[in-house]
Image: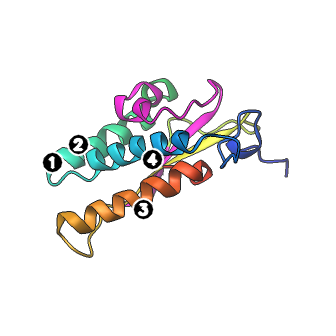
Amino acid sequence: MGIITTTTNLVNKFAYNVNDAEEHYGDRAQRNYRFLDRLWQPGAAGTAVRNNLIADAQTSQAALKANADFANLQLNLQPDVYVALLDCESGRLVYDTVPPAHPNGFYILMLPASPQARNDRSYIVAQQWAEAWYHAVRETGGM
């Protein structure tokens, strides 16, 4: 088995960097929050965002990377980083073709399941901020 290269050990690391200004992570958290706000919209609107991301991931790397919701995350991935999508709501790992045997790196975009424990806005907002901040400081987990 060869060495698996992820975005955590490429030249442009995506893990927490103590030298970055706090505002950098605040901006990332805001982008992540907006992404979840769209993904977790009630009814057909949120389902459409999820379905569009899944469809683009199945179509091609270019289609997924051009998806407005993906692009708005501003992940700054290198062009040759392979992106797969993990939909936690359905438990599916989605990608267009079998990933290269030795990719120059990969990123798994995780689509968290919509909150189900409580159906009130304050609970959902609290979950959004928790997810958004976590992924802003630890991008290796995807999102």
Q: Which residue is mark 4?
A: 29
Q: Which residue is mark 3?
A: 130
Task: Tell me how far mark 2 sits from mark 3, CA to CA.
Answer: 23 Å
Q: Are marks 4 and 2 in contact (CB under 8 Å)?
A: no
Q: Residue at x 26, y 70 (%)?
A: 116
Answer with left or right where residue 121 lies relative to residue 4: left
Task: Tell me how far mark 4 sits from mark 2, CA to CA.
Answer: 23 Å
- The amino acid marked with disc number 2 is Ala
Q: Which residue is mark 1?
A: 44
Answer with left or right where residue 49 lies relative to residue 19: left
Q: Is residue 25 above or below residue 119?
A: above
Q: Which secondary structure lies at badge 2?
A: helix
Q: Which secondary structure lies at badge 3?
A: helix
User: Where in the figure is residue 12, as x and y percent of width and height?
Assistant: 71, 33
- The amino acid marked with disc number 1 is Ala
- The amino acid marked with disc number 3 is Ala
Q: Which secondary structure lies at badge 1?
A: helix
Q: Give the residues in magenta.
A: 65-94
Question: Mark 4 or 1, which is nearer the eye?
Answer: 4
Q: Which residue is mark 2?
A: 48
User: Where in the figure is residue 117, as x and y percent of width and height?
Assistant: 27, 76
Q: Are marks 2 and 1 in contact (CB under 8 Å)?
A: yes
Task: Tell me how far mark 3 sits from mark 1, CA to CA.
Answer: 24 Å
